[in-house]
Image (spheres, grey):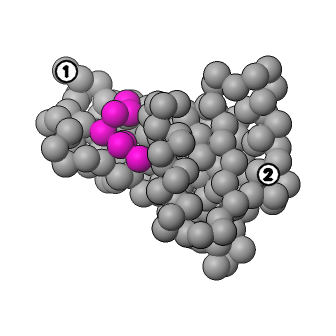
Amino acid sequence: ELARGGQCYYVVPRISMLDEAEQTIQSLFPGIRIIQAHGRMQRNGAEENVAEFAEGNYDVLLATTVIENGVDIPSVNTIVVQNSQAFGMSTLYQLRGRVGRSDKQAFAYFLYREESITEQAAMRLQAIGELSELGSGFDVANRDLEIRG
């Protein structure tokens, strides 16, 4: 993504996972510019960091689900969701919708720990992969109801 002039979101399910994820990303991509955003930051901290990221001052926004709604940055065309088995289907759908807001091909990568995946989590991830058409929100909701019983 960076090679084509874009930016990335990297999402983790827990605030406690942010620092370890940042260290991992830094070790894989030395010199990459990362900024964090999460719900327990000081007042307006997350908003200010997202604004800094949107201005292009950083390559990766490392965040929790605070970016799930209302963050639309056209230069971000790749999202990586770590431990995606820990998220609900509507959250995964919303996160995937944060990318692809420009004329460039968007990519969403849902990483998961195979030893931690439940049957329902596998079904959620499969459904998110299958329901990728624009406007498939209603279908996602229906499939989520089917999965949960």
Q: Give the range drawn in magenta.
A: 82-88
Front disc: 2 or 1: 2
Looking at the rendered image, the quarter that the N terminus falls into is bottom right
Q: How crowded is mark 1: few (under 14 residues within 10 Å), some or many (20 or more)?
A: few
Q: Can residue 134 be seen in this view?
A: no
- Residue 105 in the image: state x and y as whole percent: 57, 70
Q: Name the residue under label 2.
A: 54
Q: How far apart are marks 2 and 1 (CA)?
A: 40 Å
Q: Return the residue at label 1.
A: 149
| Residue nearest the observer in this picture, 136 or 86 | 86
Q: Within the image, what quadrant is residue 90 found in? A: top left
Residue extending furthest bottom?
3
Residue in the image at 70% along x and 41% along y: 71
- Three-letter amino acid code at disc 2? Ala
Q: Quadrant of the C terminus?
A: top left
Q: Is residue 33 visible?
A: yes
Image x and y of residue 8, in percent: 61, 58
Give percent across and percent down for residue 26. 56, 61
Looking at the rendered structure, the number of numbered marks drawn on it comes to: 2
**Earlier along the polypeptide chain: callout 2 or callout 1?**
2
- Residue 82 lies left or right of residue 124; in this view the side is right
Horizontal side, residue 134 vs residue 32: left or right = left
- Image coordinates of residue 31 in percent, x first then y, are 66, 69
Magenta-span inclusion, residue 86: yes
Which residue is depicted at the point 23% across and 23% down?
A: 148
Secondary structure of residue under mark 2: helix
> Callout 1, which amino acid?
Gly
Observer-nearest residue: 54 or 146? 54
Question: Which secondary structure lies at badge 1?
Answer: loop
Residue 38 within the magenta-colored segment of the rendering: no
Q: Against 56, is 18 above or below? A: above
